[in-house]
Image: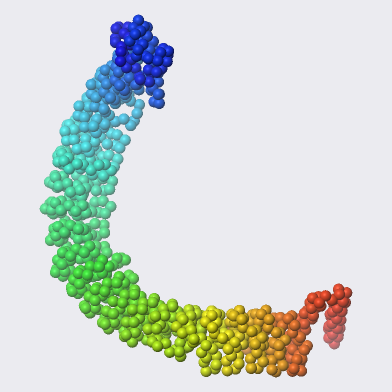
Amino acid sequence: MAGLSKAAGARHVTLSLLPPEMHLEIASWLSTPDLSSLSRTASFFHDILTPTLYRRALAYKVPKTGSSVLYWATCFRRASVIRILLEIGSDTFEEYDVKEALESAAEWGYLDVVENFLTRPSTLSASENGHFAFYLALTGGHMPVARYLCNAGADLRKLYCEELYVLHEVARNADMEALRFVLDIGVEIGEVNNLNQTALHIAAGIGHYQMVQFLLEKGADVSAIDSFGFTTLFHAASVDRRFKAPQPDSLTERAAIIKLLVACGVNMSASDANDLTVLHYVCEFGWTDMTQILIKAGADVSLRSGASRVTPLHCAVEGNQVDIVTELLSAHANPNVANDLGRIPLHLAVNGDNIAIADLLLSVSDTTYMDKHGWSTLHHAAVSGNVRVIDALLKKGDVISLPNGSDDEFTLHKLVRSRRVDLVEAFLEAGADMTLEEVQNLTAFDVAIETGQASVVDLFLYYGYDPSDIDGFSLPLHRAVSKGDEAIVSLLIDSGADVHSVNTRGMSALHLACIDGYEDIVDTLMEWDADPDLEDEDGWSPLMHALHNGYINIAELMIGELDDSILISLMQQAIELDSGDRILQSLIDLNPVIVSNRDSDGATLLHLAAAWDNAPAIRALVDEGADILAVDNKTRTPLHIAALSARPSAVQALLEAGHDPDIRDGKGKAPLHHAAAAKCLQSAMLLINHGANPVALDTTGLTPLHRIVLALILHPPASSFEDDDIPDFVCRLMDGFHIVKTLIQHGADPLDVGNVEYSAVQAAEVGSNMVLVDFIIQAYENAQYFQMIGDGVPKEMLVTWKLNEEEEEEEEEEEEEEDEYYEDDS
């Protein structure tokens, strides 16, 4: 772009030296759309225009950032622009803007820009405003700028910030020149940062041998400890895993640093916050050179440290470091020192995948050493499936299974659960105890059954396990059936397991197979003559369990040709059970015609269901077409049986199925007669509500009211009952009185003699039950009163009737008072 002018002193300045954002603003101010054209043609304005433009720039702020034009010029290293702007209006800029530009120039190493800020009058003073710029130049590695600022009076000690540690920063930058310079100007070599680290910690941590050597020569403290408990030795070994792991090519230099620190007397036994030494860490990480240096310097190779009380050998095994294990054993590390769990390094090795380490330790360790759980090397090898170790230990005759005090499993149990058939066979061949039970009372044989390992079960049987032994709380055959494993069931039976043996609930293996519906197992058991009629402690046979759960195919296997007599017997059993409706339904599904069969008394299954108050069975039978009006040899229908047996649920089910509530038996008794005689209020109410005739006469001329009165007269006294039966006695008595009241309310006349020449009231009087007599009369009077109301009797007659009733009551009270008077007088 063309030159704009020559300012005082003939310094050439171009428009491009100003911020591009100012171009439009200047063009607008000059009222010309083409600033470049103006600069070429209006040369006679140059001497006036240039100072004006720069004075305009003094107040300019860069958009978005809000920085001054000085900062903009610093960013693009426009030293000439800065010089002119400071000459024209140094007093115009705020101190903050000038300091911002100066510190940025120092951080980026722009010495010419820094000089402009500090050589112009009325700008900045390095001794007052250049301290932070000095720090930025040092830590940025710009030594010319740093030296200039230092000579100009900048002083690091005057920084008002506790978080600026120049010595540590130049050390972290690996800047030897800056480090020497900082120490030369008086910064203390022992200065610590916020983590209590010295420059020596930093230099050792970055693996800078030359810097470590220089600091040690200058007197740095080799034993200094930071806030994490790390000495310089820990930093040199780079054990702090919060930072990036060192590159392999730096390990040699780090080993040299460790050697240098050891030579200067660093404490090799010092531990960090985890109570571990450097040797523990380098052994785990596999840093051979460092390990050799520490061992040669006399580090304790058998020292137990850390919360787990591990030795360096434990750490090497955990880190899978074969070379380190070799080094430690060569240095006579004790292989039989145990950690906090009582485990020696060999225990850890056989649990790992490194066979080489296990082989190294097998030859020098005590293989019979047991940890706190009582586990030897063989137990640990069995868990990990380390076949080579197991073979070696078995040849030595190591103990195979030992009890322990924890919830952990025995060796043989672990092997079975891990499905290591080869190892199980090796243990059995070596004579492992097959009868040991763990906490859950399971043997390893039980575990094999539980996990469905037929091949392992076969191994146990081959080595002499008795399949009829009770293991814990269950027989092996029962356990196999419960798992539904037909292959194992066959193995056990072929080896002598008793198919007739029962568990603590009286259940055989066939019971369990029928409960769970294992048809193939039922077939196998039946081939070995298992008993389908054997009853458990609840009286249920395997066949009933199969029917209850709807396993029709299994039922067919057990009852063959399905003889009708067997079916009827099963149906009768099902009806008598509280939850037998599912069994009944299964039997009906097998042969629906059987629902109409009768027993020797002429009773159908519906009669039996009524007698047992089994409403679900009644509904199932009715749904299959059972005749609800069928009569037995005594001409009684199922409803008669339900009523005389005081079975209200059955009464309701039969009435809902459409049974005639007034049907008569051979003696002319309706169901209501039977319900009344049985003193069953619920049955009586159901029958009346379904239209039963409350004044029906039987062949002897008795109504239901007669029947209930006679039943109450003949009701045994309370003295004939046991104490526990008194509540039932009271309930039945109260129900009887309620039936009397209900019948009278529904039209029964207690004064009607019927065909027997005595009324219900007279029957009560003959029975000397005056309470019942009074109750009947009172119920009858109340019924008459409410009947009169219902018939629309005039109010005056009701009042007169009521007054007469009250007069009679008053006369009775007067007579009672006279009787009491004469009794007192006498």
Which of these two is toward me, 65 or 723? 65
Say above or below: 825 vs 63.
below
Say above or below: 609 vs 95.
below
Q: How is the image coloured?
A: rainbow
Q: Give the image quarter of residue 705.
A: bottom right
Q: Give the image quarter of residue 611.
A: bottom right
Which residue sits at x=22%, y=65%?
Answer: 382
Residue 730 pos. (x, y %): 65, 82
Which of these two is toward me, 271 or 194? 194
Residue 179 pos. (x, y %): 22, 28
Which residue sits at x=31%, y=35%?
Answer: 194
Which of these two is toward me, 365 or 549? 549
Residue 630 pos. (x, y %): 58, 89
Residue 198 pos. (x, y %): 25, 35
Which residue sits at x=61%, y=87%?
Answer: 640
Left or right, residue 661 beside residue 216? right
Which residue sits at x=66%, y=82%?
Answer: 687
Left or right, residue 750 beside residue 724? right
The quarter of the image holding the C terminus is bottom right
Left or right, residue 723 beside residue 699? left
Q: Residue furthest left?
A: 330
Q: Give the image quarter of residue 425.
A: bottom left
> Residue 405, can we see it?
yes
> Residue 771, can we see it?
no
Say above or below: 429 vs 110.
below
